[in-house]
């Protein structure tokens, strides 16, 4: 009984203490601070492997004014952006980072300037498959365009649904997307979003804008980009001409449509005209990409289930996945970083000391430590001091050696910059990538500043060069204008390399007019700028040619063969076999510029005639390039440091050479090939590759849109078990099939198949009537059939394409 009051007292005390502590314990759960945060990944969360993802972050502040950073961790380290939040503020900012390929969620936080986390959020992301061609649809709210795009063939990735607010204000997060179909109001796009789309198109993307009743709002932001001008509405238009173009029948109810029709711009191509002769469907080259405009809306009722809609999309977006897998890929990011790091390290201060000096130092060290010290000590009869003298001599000799090395390397901090300025002849902006190497005479850390809202990252090299680093390093970066990279660590007499990417308003100096002929690209390069351009050249994945230096206003003609028969790289074709000679400033310059060409187009090996296509949203060439010494459109500054700067810039003009007018020859690697039907023992094992035995397969081969209007004088159908031999167009190499395989081509005039011959006898067949096999949309149908194939042959692979010669009228 005596214990009960004491127990009750203890319980009462505990309850009272808990009551006092409860508000404090519950505060983080209930209040979570005055700042709230929501994050949403742009581009539907998609990003290219090793590429940039964009995240829109919305911040609200219900408390007093506060400043801090929106931050996240990526492959390059911590990325953050400074934000000021007044009281009652509601603000949206964008953060860009490079996630790891396997990451599915990005964790973001808002932290105070002291580093305390004030709010958190997350955004879902997903890496794009590298081997697939990706299409995004902006504004397909009813989901009517999605099944049309899916219906163009098997194995394509799902179309990516977007809304206008999903578009970033920079082009980098759009890399990896091949085509954007626009069916939404574009009037709300910001100037930065519009410029981002322009740069994405100029780098190889394809933008297709749909018209219809809402054409005014859909085209509001794209007026200067479109292939037509002077658009107006026509209420009684019909789809008869469009259906005829794809070889089908117009859907019911398509004879009284509201369409947008305009006048064709210079250099645009008309694909379909209405009954009155107005341009209903057109395309125009913009840099390395293309912009198309279709005056009717394929998402409206007459076309929602129209079979011809998928054929329209397959014509605009050819299936070139096999071509990309076999020979169209660019260098991996790591290899580009290796090449550019080596180019940045090509400085006198980073050269290895002469062999003669190294030999003299080694011999002097051996003599000093060995016989000389012994003779001196013996002469003074103090040989017992050898154990003291030897370490002292080592220290003195090391100090002298360091002094010699330091005097050779110099005592200044050096920033070596190479700027790659990607633009197009008719562009208003440029994507500028500045690669900068920071050389330090002492071990130190530096803070870097770059103007222009640049994206900063360390070059993730894989080499083991002691002068260029080689380790994978991460640095905290701050985005904004200006941008900062913090704590760049450089070893003694070492160098670290970084990369800065920005989009700047830019008027290119170089201009090019070029066309694809029978066996070469011929054209003229002109310098419209106020400064000389050095080492102007035309380069592609399959070859290159030096044009020369161009003074302001000067122009020169060039001819670039479509075939590289000598096996040398593009850089060697431009500069010759410079090797590793760096004995003179000019030879060192040639070596650096050769390395930059290697980074742009690889080391050669592209398919002949493979000059450009709207694939992957990234430049594949050909390019017109020209150099300017001491040019730095995007400077890298070292905070609080006096530096010695070396700088040069290469202007890279993207473009798609015209085809014709006049005689042209189009090889298999310039054609799109897709499998449209298999029957019997036939199956498609990968894009464009079919195994066949006792069955048949039909291929559809398509001309580039730029070859619209070609009148063929010769059509040669080619078949093989190896698609690579067809793409390389090796006319003296045949891979014949066993008995029982035959090939046929469809005659559009006779509306029947024409048997061409036995594939066990030969693999190349000239079509008797070339004009009969090319339809109005520039396509050829080829069929390979097999019967009575012996079981021991199994199911060999088959592939078909064509080579076409003809004339394109002006």
Image (cartoon, helix red, strand yellow):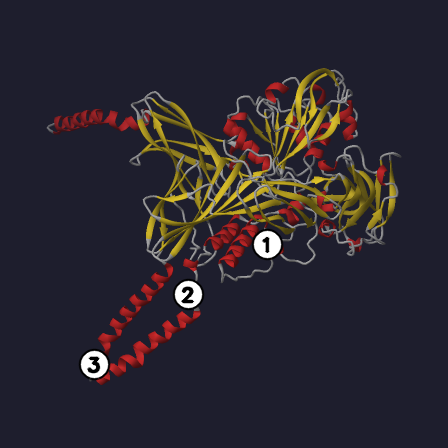
Screen quadrant of the C terminus: top right
- Residue 49 seen from this side: no
407 versus 418 height, above or below: below
Q: What element carries label 2?
A: loop
Screen quadrant of the N terminus: top left
Nearer-N-terminus badge (3/2): 2
Identify the image quadrant of residue 200.
Answer: top right
Tell how many labels: 3
Q: Is mark 3 on a helix, strand or loop?
A: helix
- For disc 1, the marked residue is 571
Identify the image quadrant of residue 451.
Answer: top left
- For disc 3, the marked residue is 384
Image coordinates of residue 698 in percent, x first then y, are 78, 40
| Residue pictured at 74% horizontal, 22% vertical | 278
Distance (Cα) linking label 3 and label 2:
37 Å
Q: Does residue 88 appear left or right of residue 309 in this picture?
A: left
Which residue sits furthest left? 2
Image coordinates of residue 507 in percent, x first then y, are 54, 36
- For disc 2, the marked residue is 353
Distance (Cα) linking label 1 and label 3:
63 Å
464 versus 504 height, above or below: below
Instruction: Tell me, yes or no, whether the two marked residues, 1 and 3, touch with CB atoms within 8 Å.
Output: no
Label 3 neighbour load within 10 Å: few <14, some 14-19, many 20+:
few
498 versus 568 height, above or below: above
Image coordinates of residue 770 in percent, x first then y, are 85, 41
Q: Does residue 510 appear left or right of residue 489 in this picture?
A: right
Residue in the foreground of this view, choosing between 570 and 538: 538
Distance (Cα) linking label 2 and label 1:
28 Å
């Amino acid at each position: 009984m005596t214990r009960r009051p004491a127990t009750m007292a203890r319980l009462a005390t505990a309850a009272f203490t808990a009551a006092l502590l409860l508000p404090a314990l519950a505060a983080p759960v209930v209040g979570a601070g005055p700042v709230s945060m929501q994050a949403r990944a742009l581009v539907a969360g998609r990003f290219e492997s090793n590429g940039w993802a964009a995240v829109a972050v919305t911040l609200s502040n219900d408390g007093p004014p506060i400043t801090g950073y929106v931050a996240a961790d990526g492959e390059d380290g911590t990325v953050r952006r400074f934000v000021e939040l007044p009281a009652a503020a509601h603000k949206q900012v964008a953060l860009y980072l490079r996630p790891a390929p396997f990451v599915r969620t990005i964790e973001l936080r808002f932290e105070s300037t002291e580093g305390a986390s004030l709010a958190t959020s997350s955004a879902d992301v997903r890496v794009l498959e590298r081997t697939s061609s990706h299409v995004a649809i902006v504004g397909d709210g009813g989901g009517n365009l999605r099944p049309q795009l899916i219906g163009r063939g098997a194995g394509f990735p799902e179309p990516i649904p977007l809304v206008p607010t999903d578009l970033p204000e920079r082009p980098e997060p759009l890399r990896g997307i091949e085509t954007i179909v626009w069916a939404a109001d574009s009037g709300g796009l910001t100037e930065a979003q519009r410029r981002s789309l322009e740069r994405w198109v100029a780098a190889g993307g394809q933008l297709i804008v749909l018209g219809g009743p809402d054409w005014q709002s859909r085209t509001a932001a794209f007026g200067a980009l479109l292939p037509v001008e002077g658009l107006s509405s026509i209420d009684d238009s019909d789809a008869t001409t469009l259906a005829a173009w794809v070889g089908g029948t117009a859907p019911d109810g398509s004879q009284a449509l509201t369409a947008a029709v305009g006048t064709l711009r210079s250099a645009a191509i008309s694909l379909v005209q209405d009954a009155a002769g107005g341009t209903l469907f057109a395309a125009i080259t913009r840099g390395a990409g293309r912009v198309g405009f279709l005056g009717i809306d394929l998402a409206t009722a007459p076309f929602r289930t129209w079979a011809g809609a998928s054929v329209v999309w397959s014509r605009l977006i050819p299936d070139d996945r096999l071509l990309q897998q076999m020979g169209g890929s660019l260098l991996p990011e790591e290899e580009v970083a290796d090449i550019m790091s080596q180019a940045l390290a090509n400085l006198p201060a980073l050269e290895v000391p002469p062999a003669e000096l190294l030999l003299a130092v080694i011999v002097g060290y051996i003599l000093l430590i060995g016989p000389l010290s012994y003779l001196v000590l013996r002469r003074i009869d103090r040989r017992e001091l050898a154990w003291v003298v030897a370490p002292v001599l080592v220290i003195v000799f090391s100090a002298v050696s360091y002094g010699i090395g330091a005097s050779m390397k110099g005592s200044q901090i050096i920033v070596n910059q190479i700027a790659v300025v990607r633009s197009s002849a008719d562009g208003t902006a440029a994507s500028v990538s500045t690669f900068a190497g920071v050389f330090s005479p002492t071990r130190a850390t530096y803070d870097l500043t770059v103007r222009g809202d640049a994206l900063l990252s360390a070059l993730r090299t894989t080499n083991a060069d002691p002068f260029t680093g080689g380790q994978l390093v991460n640095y905290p970066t701050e985005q904004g204008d200006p941008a900062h990279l913090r704590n760049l660590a450089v070893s003694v007499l070492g160098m670290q390399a970084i990369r800065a990417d920005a989009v700047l308003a830019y008027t290119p100096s170089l201009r090019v007019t070029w066309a694809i002929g029978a066996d070469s690209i011929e054209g003229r390069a002109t310098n419209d700028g106020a400064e000389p351009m050095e080492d102007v050249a035309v380069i592609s994945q399959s070859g290159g040619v030096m044009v020369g230096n161009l003074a302001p206003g000067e122009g020169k003609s060039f001819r670039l063969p479509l075939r590289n028969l000598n096996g040398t790289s593009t850089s060697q074709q431009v500069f010759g076999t410079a090797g590793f000679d760096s004995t003179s400033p000019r030879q060192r310059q040639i070596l650096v510029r050769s390395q930059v060409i290697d980074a742009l187009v690889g080391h050669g090996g592209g398919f002949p005639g493979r000059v450009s296509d709207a694939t992957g949203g990234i430049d594949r060439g050909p390019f017109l390039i020209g150099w300017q010494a001491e040019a730095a459109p995007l400077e890298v500054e070292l905070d609080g440091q006096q530096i010695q700067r070396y700088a040069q810039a290469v202007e890279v003009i993207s473009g798609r050479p015209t085809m014709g007018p006049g005689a042209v020859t189009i090889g298999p690697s310039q054609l799109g090939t897709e499998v449209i039907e298999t029957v019997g023992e036939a199956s498609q094992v990968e894009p464009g590759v079919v195994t066949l035995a006792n069955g048949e397969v039909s291929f559809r081969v398509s001309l580039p849109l730029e070859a619209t209007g070609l009148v063929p004088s010769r059509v040669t159908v080619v078949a093989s078990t190896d698609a690579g031999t067809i793409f390389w167009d090796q006319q003296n190499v045949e891979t014949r099939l066993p008995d029982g395989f035959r090939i046929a081509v469809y005659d559009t005039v006779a509306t029947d198949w024409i048997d061409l011959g036995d594939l066990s006898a030969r693999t190349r067949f000239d079509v008797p009537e070339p004009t009969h096999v090319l339809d109005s949309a520039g396509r050829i149908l080829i069929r390979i059939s097999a019967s009575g194939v012996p079981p021991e042959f199994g199911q060999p692979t088959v592939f078909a394409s064509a080579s076409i010669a003809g004339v394109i009228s002006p």
